Amino acid sequence: MSVNGITNYGTTYNSTSYETKAKSVSEKSEKTEATVESGVVYEPSTSTGTAASTKKTYKQNPELINKLKAETEARTAQLKSLVEKLMLGQGNAIGTADDMWSFLRTGNFTVDAATKAQAQADIAEDGYWGVNQTSDRIIDFAKALCGGDPEKIEEMRAAFEKGFKQAEKTWGGELPEISKKTYNAVMEKFDAWANESEA
């Protein structure tokens, strides 16, 4: 065996190996250049969360709930005081809250000018006990209770309907026209809230 045979073999092997590697590197370089020229660049995602992590968390708003309760209690006390004064003026004894509602339901009383003016202001379109403000307060209270969670809309609507039926029972029959208008306004606002949430 000659030294040239071994040398030729090594040279041929190295030459072929080098040519294959050079061709491979050249092809990769051409592919990379073509990719950059066409504007396609891979950028890894920075998001590590899942779809579940994007779900909004809803929480009650105790501050608003307490504010609405306190405001309503103060206004209810004012209304009760007005009715008590009216009942005393009629010579009727003040009994339980049920007596107050049954007294009002009969409509068998007279009202002085100041009391009438106050009551009309309170139930006017923009009054505290008017349709707009009362329905707004009911919806605000429902949203505060469920933290604005749209999945709770129907639960809040059912609670409102239950409360309305209890009010009819307490009243002793069909509620006045303003109450029916308020009921309809609240239902419309529940619908608007549901449609807004779907959008």
Image (cartoon, rainbow, N blue to C red):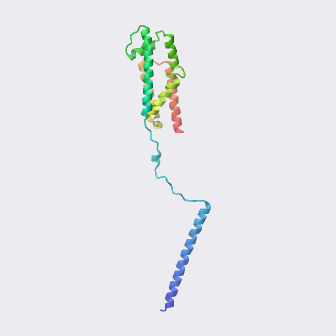
At 42% from the left and 33% from the top, the residue drawn is 62
Up-down: is 146 above or below 129? below
Q: Residue most toward the right?
A: 37
Expressed as whole percent of the image width and height from the top left, the position of residue 110 reads 48, 9
Q: Nearer the viewer, residue 166 or 34?
A: 34
Total tally of numbered discs in the picture = 0
Q: Nearer the viewer, residue 175 or 108?
A: 108
Image vertical order of residue 80 relative to residue 150, above or below: above
Q: Residue 155's x, y, as percent? A: 44, 33
Give the residue displayed 49% in from the left and 18% down from the top.
Answer: 176
Give the position of the C terminus as an image quadrant. top right
Q: Residue at x 39, y 14 (%)?
A: 99
Up-down: is 54 above or below 190? Answer: below
Where is residue 109? Give x, y as percent: 46, 9
- Residue 162 visible to an observer of this rendering: no
| Residue 34 shows in this picture | yes
Residue furthest out toward the bottom = 2
| Extreme residue in the top direction | 91
Q: Residue 21 appears in which quarter of the rendering?
A: bottom right
Residue 79 rendering spot, x and y as whole percentages:
45, 18
Which of these two is toward me, 78 or 111? 78
Residue 181 falls left or right of residue 92: right
Residue 40 position by quadrant? bottom right
